[in-house]
Amino acid sequence: MAFAVACLLAIAPAGRSRAQGLDYHAYEQLFGEPVTASATGKPERVSETPVQMDVITAEDIRRSGVRDLPTLLRRLGAVDVLRGSSTMADVGIGGFIRSLSSRVMVTINDRPVYSDLMGAVLWPTLAVELPEIRQIEVIKGAQSALYGFNAVDGVINIVTFAPDTDPVNVVQARIGNHARRDGTAIASIGLGEGRGIRLTAATDHAGDSGLVVRTPLDAAFRKDPNRRSFAFDGRWSFTDGGAARIGASHTDVTDRTVAYNAYFEARVVTDVVEASYARDSAVGHWSADLSYTSMDLPWVASEPTGQQTNRDRLLDIRLSDLFKLGADDSFRLGSEIRHDALTSSNLQGGTLTGDLLAGSVMWQHRFSPDWSMVNAARFDHDALGRSGPGGRVDLFGNQAFDRAVMGTSVNSALVGRITGEDTLRLAFGRGLKLPSLTNFGLPVRFLPRYSNSLLSENPNLPAASVDDLRLAWDHALDGGATVARLALFHDATSKTVGPVAAVVAGRPVLMTASTAGVVTNGMELGLLHRARRGWTWQANYTLDRLHEHRDQGLRDSLPEHKINLEAGYAWEDWQAGLAAAYRSPTRGLVLQAGPRPIVTVGNIKAHSELSPHVAWQAGDNVRVDLTAENLWPYQDTLLQKMDTRYYLSITISY
């Protein structure tokens, strides 16, 4: 067996990675565990990757009974989720998280979904449904040299089933309390050997719930969350060893979230077109990926700032070549070109642009069958520009945006198998965090009720660096069916972005500025046991000690102690499971309206969560799931409560 694995890895083309050519099923059957290509670009067993990684499989998703990705991710160790509504969430890794300020790179089949318009990942806008997900790869720690400028705390890569080799044909309906009505239809069509397409359509609706009334105007922010989604995914393999993929998607979402101590409500319309091609050649395995994303906010409203409109257009091109020099050294050369254009009613017809050029190199060296090392570096150059009349109160002028922000990211990791059951990982990463276009150049006027002041743009914002150090030890038990983990991490952010009082052109304003950084020290303990039949269970504990140098009275503003417990049992045609969690007390900000609006600090109580689930496989093609979430309602922000929710789901496979 070991000889077969070694031979397969030796002959596997590097690029059969990157989610478009890797035969996940064949490798999983051979290795007896999930495989990934996210760490180096080559197919690897998850237990041998040089990075600390958690993998959520399709079977894990089915047995969980959850209906959205943030709820699923919340059950992992060292992952934080802040709920801005019953459907919106911010996800962080490593103990530091802020609303609408993503520090985690989220990708779908390796395509980044980060938008400069909001400076965040808006989870409901992702055109991917749970039944079509093969696995979710969660990489912890700074990965900017491997993934790009926004991957300063980690990467979440969502891998879908390939329509040419793993067809998914599903119709799913879900009803629940709070007027929950969801529907999903997925159809895969084979077009011959190595060719196939998948069509996915979905609609979600829920009654708004959980809003904590703090000011008289909160009542206006009660539009029900709605989502409509459509996606097309097509893949073709060619006789010359090449593989192509094209995709398109459309989502239309109306939702609300909590950010910067206030409610923001918006309609977000997102359209994506993407294409990629990869093949093996005499110079290695090269690939080209292109995507174009249009994100429109026909309206976005908040209590302090009123209503505005925004549009963002993003073109992203990525090229890479993965090759070997000798038996023990692999290299990957990469480049990225991004053009982003932001328009807004706050810019009065002006356009703010960002043009990014980046180059990267990775080197993997295998010292022996049990020890290997990966080193990577990336340089980013982001050139700003602005045209048009500028903001309603233009404090800088277009010439102030004629500048560039640049910086270098590095990653270095050592992984070794100490014994047949023990794996040790030591990793260092310096990530580069670039301000979003919104941070650079989108001025906001507060309403008279909120002091009538101006939150000014700031084209002079610098890039921030994030230094991350991780030591992880995994120990396999029961022949690998159970894995125990101990991980220690240190994360230091040089600067954060926030509002500060300033005087510009003789005028007192609030300005988006770089403020003091953040340090997190933590520990993760975990146990995971997987099985097709019988018991499946996991338990993890995370200790986060967060120190904000500019804390606004919010030092340790995330739970210091987090515990997740999950157990499930499968027998004959039935599955049952129970997920529980505990979060220690913390603090949060709340905005109080009035003649002199002020931001105050409030206490968030410790809370426990309990979510049971039972499923019945009614024949070969019908599955019935009954799920309850948050049997004890809780708050992780001062403005939003997560109510108890009940779901009944029926899934028909054909």
Image: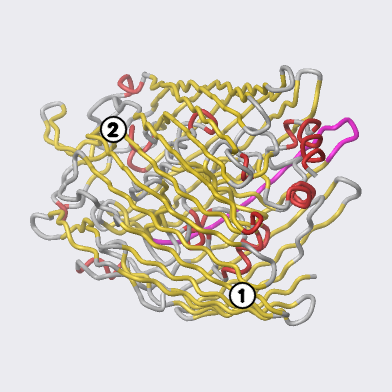
Other-residue count near label 1 (Cα within 10 Å), few / some / many at <14 / 14–19 / ≥20:
some
Q: Which amino acid type is shown beneath numbered disc 2?
A: Lys
- Which residue is at the front of the view, 54 or 86? 54
**Residue 537 location (% of width, % of height):** 55, 66
Picture residue at 64% right of the left edge, 34% below the top: 370
Q: CA distance from mark 2 to mark 1?
A: 46 Å
Residue occupied by mark 1: 569
- Which residue is at the front of the view, 478 or 640? 478
Picture residue at 38% right of the left edge, 48% below the top: 523
Q: In what quadrant of the picture does the C terminus appear?
A: bottom right
Span shown in magenta: 237-256
Q: Is residue 355 above or below residue 532?
A: above
- As drawn, is 101 to the left or to the right of 31? left
Q: Which mark is residue 495?
A: 2
> Could you tell me which secondary element the residue under label 2 belongs to?
strand
Magenta run includes residue 115: no
Q: In what quadrant of the picture does the N terminus appear?
A: top right
Magenta run includes residue 241: yes
Q: Quadrant of residue 120?
A: top left
Q: Quadrant of residue 371?
A: top right
Picture residue at 51% right of the left edge, 76% below the top: 180
Other-residue count near label 2 (Cα within 10 Å), few / some / many at <14 / 14–19 / ≥20:
some
Scheme of colours in the image? secondary structure
**Residue 594 location (% of width, % of height):** 11, 60
Dominant secondary structure, magenta:
strand
Q: Which amino acid type is shown beneath numbered disc 1?
A: Tyr
Q: Nearer the viewer, mark 2 or mark 1?
A: 1
Q: Quadrant of residue 204?
A: bottom right
**Residue 376 location (% of width, % of height):** 54, 24
